[in-house]
Image (cartoon, coloured by chain):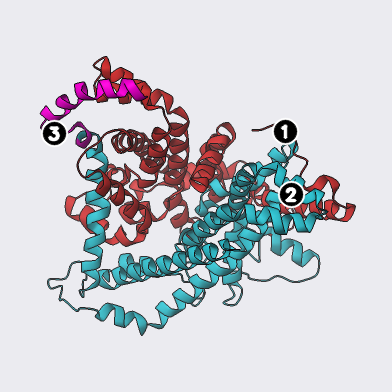
Amino acid sequence: MSTDSRPIRADRSPVWISSSKWIFVGVGLVLALVPFIWMISTSFRSEKDLFGNPASLFPTEWTLHGYQGVWEQLPFVLLLFNTVIFAGVTTVLTLLFDSMCAYALARLDFRGKNICFWLVLVTLMVPFQVTLIPVFIELFHFGWLNTYQGLIIPRATSAFGIFLFRQFFVSIPRELDEAARIDGASHLRIYAQIILPLAKPAIATVAVLNFTALWNDLLWPLVVTSAPEMRTLPAGLALFGGQHVTDHAVLLAGAVISLIPIALAFFLAQRYFVAGVATTGLK
Amino acid sequence: MSTLTRVRGPQTRPRAHRLRIPPAWLFIAPSFLILGVFVLWPILVSLWYSLHDWTIGADDQPWVGLDNYVALTQDAKFWGALLHTAEITVVSVVLIVILGLALALALSRESIGNRIIRSAFFFPTVVSLTSIGLVWRFLLDPELGLVGGIMSSLGLGTVGFLQSPELALPTVIFVNVWKNAGFVMIILIAGLKGVPTERFEAARLDGAGPWQLVRFVTVPALRPTLLFGTLIMTIQSFQLFDLVYVMTGGGPLFSTDTLVTLLYREGFVNFQTGYASAISWALFLVIVVISALQLRIFRYNDVD
């Protein structure tokens, strides 16, 4: 966010460097943007137009059949609803549970605290795939396969979130909650009325990163759900892309719609994406 | 802090002692219940499965010791998957870091234009690999894709990038690099903000040219961020699943099969639970070894 224009790099560099720099950035931009432009434009194209004129970036004739077909040929309402529930509810629970846990780890002294922190780090390090099969069998025994609780509860806390919240809470001056302690405030009140309101940037960061990761996740919903009516968008698109749907505009329309919430979040809250990426990188 | 805290100390202590259940335990209970049941315990169970000939639904799950791991070392599919995963990881990470660094250097100055261009490069990193895989699969389709269309209108003929056992893996790597270069760019730009401007000024006064600035000032100053980017990208590439699942399904002829697509197939299609668990531990082991090596390499460089 700093506005100082630093007199580093570039400005005094020779012409060939700055011009090759802009060629590099320009080619990169074309490569970065064309797939998205093509994705959107092709979702408005007919199969005939696509096969007849594949070299064109834009439709010769715009049609909405992709966006009509997506509701008729896919269980798209259900896919969308399931994804909203899965990503939304899980994110809310994660924010609550992770921040509570982080409050205890950052602010309270209790027996086993070091072990707890160490266990959080262990879960951060072990790849998710190691636990996938045992969790699948657990969920089978609970009767939770193909249910919302099966999708949501195992993912309702994240070691990464606990870690990020803890780092943030540690940086909040202790004087604030100690003053409240003298006034007889309980830990619950300090957590809810002092710490959380100060932690809005951390909340936004965890919320945005978590929601995106869950909304985009393929492997977990693929494993937990097998019934078509319990699928989420990525799993539904991947499976229908493999078999039933042969109309490309329909699948791309589905992909475009599934991209809209993430794109909105990205443009409205980009600094929290960056903050999440950057804070984990620098601390 | 000082005097007040000392006076306050004794008043708060006894209250905490009187409680049977420390309040802290209530705060950590939801998270640790979930982590315990769905992460920590399953880690142990996974190890246990990997030592059995465990098949979902079978009456008998006999103990086989390390047989699953021995079988892994004799399984051509496993070596194939390991090799592809290693190729994807090494080539992707090198290209992602180089391109990310180049973009960061080109776009680090704060201006509205640069900020918009950065967003364009960062955007693919937040989009689902499923959508990206789908779009690139269609883009590269020899019959209807833009790439094939442009190539044939230039008279080059069409190429089935994902249908060819030789080209499928490089194509998956290309898309993986395409998606992630912006991630490394963003963390490096954040890292650059922490480098004191004076260092560049000093080097400049000593007569350093642009390349020398990058080589001797920027890159050394970014070493921790470069390490972090390399580590994250390595771990992510080793766990690559979505992109392969959507673009090639591991084919053609298993030429893009990765450790995680193999694990998925063994565990959730063939229901070889014990064997798939052994694969997951092999994956973990490889990640640990490589992360340790990278930490070692970067720290080794710290000496000079």
Of mark 2 and mark 3, the one earlier in the sequence is 3
Please, what secondary structure does the residue beneath circle 1 have?
A: loop
Q: Are marks 3 and 1 in contact (CB under 8 Å)?
A: no
User: Looking at this rendering, what residue extends furthest in the top direction?
Assistant: A183
Question: Which residue is drawn at the image coordinates 24% and 58% (left, top)?
Answer: B42
Report whether A126 appears left or right of B292: left
Residue B106's label in the rendered image is: 2
Quick check: B150 above or below B257?
above
- B238 vs A129, left or right, is right
Which disc is residue B21 wearing? 3
Q: Is residue B40 left or right of residue A268?
A: left
Which chain is disc 1 placed on?
Answer: A
Seen in the image, is A14 located left or right of residue B195? right
Which span is picked out in magenta? B1-25
Specify the colour of chain A.
Answer: red
| Percent x, y of residue A160 | 39, 46
Residue at the farthest right position: A15
Q: Residue at x 20, y 24 (%)?
A: B10
Tell me how far mark 3 sits from mark 1, CA to CA: 53 Å
